[in-house]
């Protein structure tokens, strides 16, 4: 009987502790909502041995974006507006594109869908109220891992 | 497959259980990876992720990953709890109840995913939690009833043990050791069927989506019904034996009646003896 009480009590502590912790935290699905402006596109690392970019080239946002992102849905986008209904408004170069967005896993994968066949996935490496960092593996012309950094401009 | 316990299990019992449940675990793990981008048949990676999220200070992710690990633990706890507390009452029920719970969990995932899933993060987290609980149940059951010989949801230990066994087989004395050879066969079969299950799930998912979980449940039903059929057959056999036994008694009584008849007993006495 005594051991039963200890087990039930332990389980209660775990459940209450978990509930308390979750009540103090915010889901990434909420944090990501709002308007984000692209701050930079960078090559974080190359996957080929001996390949490297000179330091002065690593933050050439436009050049890297053109090189890596030309086949991506997000290529022209400069401002990303995440809406609560699962829609993402991509604006840039005078164009506007509406796509669907979802978070997967534990909130570490951002999935962007242009249509049923055109789906892109980004690793959501960092997300807080002011900045967001996405990583993706560029496997088109330039292989390696690219890093996209955003800063929040408007809270929805 | 399920009715025998611990050391009374043969290699064949463990092979059947190991192969079927490893196939299921492989399927579930790849399905969860393809749909939700998270592993569900093991928690080693989740511990690494937990540490990384703690270091980053992501409280929400820490909570989510902690709950996943806890549910895998709780699945193992509940499975063994059922086995050790119900086995004196009904061995088959004790061993099949965790599988029934696992079927219920995976069926919920399949039905919810197919008809209600809106792809929100909260739904994803709950479904993953359910799958981790189901895998904890399965792992707890197989390990419990096989005296820790069969663990099918993760292959780290299996691969390590296989590596050790193959190194032992470089010596003749170990090569000729039957239990060691049997263990190698069991572990190798688990490894291969886990992989096959994973490949099948990968191929099926692109065609049938969440219905892959119905397919998974078919294999779990085989695990349950295989022994159920044996239990029914055994019961039928026992009943037949019971039916046969009185008729033998009646035969003896008839012989006794004839003997009494020879001794010139009254008819009434004879009838009493026959219907007794």
Image (cartoon, coloured by chain):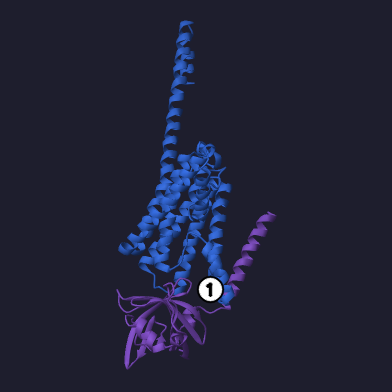
Chain colours: A purple, B blue
Please identify the residue farthest to the top as the structure is shown.
B263
Tell me residue B175's x, y (percent): 50, 39
Tell me residue B100's x, y (percent): 46, 52
**At 41% from the left edge and 36% from the top edge, which residue is drawn?**
B233
Dot 1: element:
helix
Q: Residues within 10 Å of mark 1 (few under 14, many from 20)?
A: many
Q: Nearer the viewer, residue B241 or B247?
A: B241
Q: Nearer the viewer, residue B156 or B223?
A: B156
Query: Quadrant of the rendered structure where residue B120 is?
Result: bottom left
**At 44% from the left edge and 51% from the top edge, which residue is drawn?**
B191
Q: Is residue B62 visible?
A: no
Q: How many marks?
A: 1
Q: Chain of mark 1?
A: B
Q: Is residue B20 visible?
A: yes
Please identify the residue farthest to the right as the structure is shown.
A2
Query: Quadrant of the rendered structure where residue A142 is?
Result: bottom left
Please identify the residue farthest to the bottom as the structure is shown.
A94
Residue under label 1 = B61
Query: Looking at the picture, does residue B98 appear above or below residue A18?
Result: above
Tell me residue A150's x, y (percent): 46, 86
Query: Looking at the picture, does residue B64 appear above or below residue B212?
Result: below
Tell me residue B207's x, y (percent): 30, 63
């Amino acid at each position: 009987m005594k051991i039963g009480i200890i087990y039930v009590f332990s389980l209660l502590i775990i459940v209450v502790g978990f509930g308390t912790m979750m009540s103090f935290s915010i889901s990434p699905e909420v944090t990501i909502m709002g308007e984000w402006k692209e701050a930079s596109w960078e090559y974080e690392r190359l996957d080929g041995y001996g390949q490297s970019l000179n330091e002065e080239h690593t933050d050439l946002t436009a050049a890297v974006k053109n090189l890596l992102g030309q086949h991506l849905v997000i290529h022209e986008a400069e401002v990303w507006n995440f809406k609560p209904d699962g829609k993402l408004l991509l604006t840039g170069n005078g164009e506007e594109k509406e796509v669907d967005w979802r978070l997967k896993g534990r909130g570490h994968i951002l999935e962007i869908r242009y249509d049923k066949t055109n789906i892109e996935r980004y690793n959501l490496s960092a997300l807080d109220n002011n900045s967001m960092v996405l990583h993706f593996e560029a496997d088109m012309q330039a292989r390696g891992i690219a890093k996209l950094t955003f800063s929040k401009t408007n809270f929805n | 497959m399920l009715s025998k316990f611990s050391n009374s299990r043969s290699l064949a019992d463990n092979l059947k259980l190991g192969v079927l449940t490893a196939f299921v675990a492989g399927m579930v793990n790849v399905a969860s990876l393809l749909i939700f981008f998270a592993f569900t048949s093991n928690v080693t990676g989740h511990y690494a992720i937990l540490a990384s999220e703690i270091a980053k200070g992501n409280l929400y992710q820490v909570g989510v990953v902690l709950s996943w690990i806890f549910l895998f633990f709780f699945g193992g706890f509940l499975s063994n709890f059922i086995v050790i507390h119900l086995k004196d009452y009904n061995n088959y029920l004790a061993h099949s109840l965790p599988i029934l719970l696992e079927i219920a969990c995976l069926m919920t995932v399949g039905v919810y995913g197919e008809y209600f899933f809106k792809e929100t993060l909260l739904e994803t987290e709950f479904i993953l939690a359910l799958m981790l609980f189901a895998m904890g149940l399965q792992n707890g059951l197989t390990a419990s009833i096989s005296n820790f010989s069969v663990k099918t949801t993760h292959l780290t230990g299996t691969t390590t043990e296989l590596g050790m066994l193959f190194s032992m087989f470089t010596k003749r004395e170990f090569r000729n050791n039957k239990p060691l050879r049997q263990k190698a066969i069991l572990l190798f079969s688990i490894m291969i069927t886990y992989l096959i299950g994973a490949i099948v799930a990968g191929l099926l998912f692109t065609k049938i989506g969440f219905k892959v979980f119905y397919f998974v449940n078919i294999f779990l039903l085989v695990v349950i019904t295989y022994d159920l059929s044996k239990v029914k057959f055994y019961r039928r056999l026992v009943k037949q034996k019971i039916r046969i036994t009185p008729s033998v008694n009646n035969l003896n009584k008839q012989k006794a009646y004839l003997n009494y008849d020879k001794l010139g007993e009254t008819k009434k006495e004879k009838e009493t003896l026959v219907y007794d």
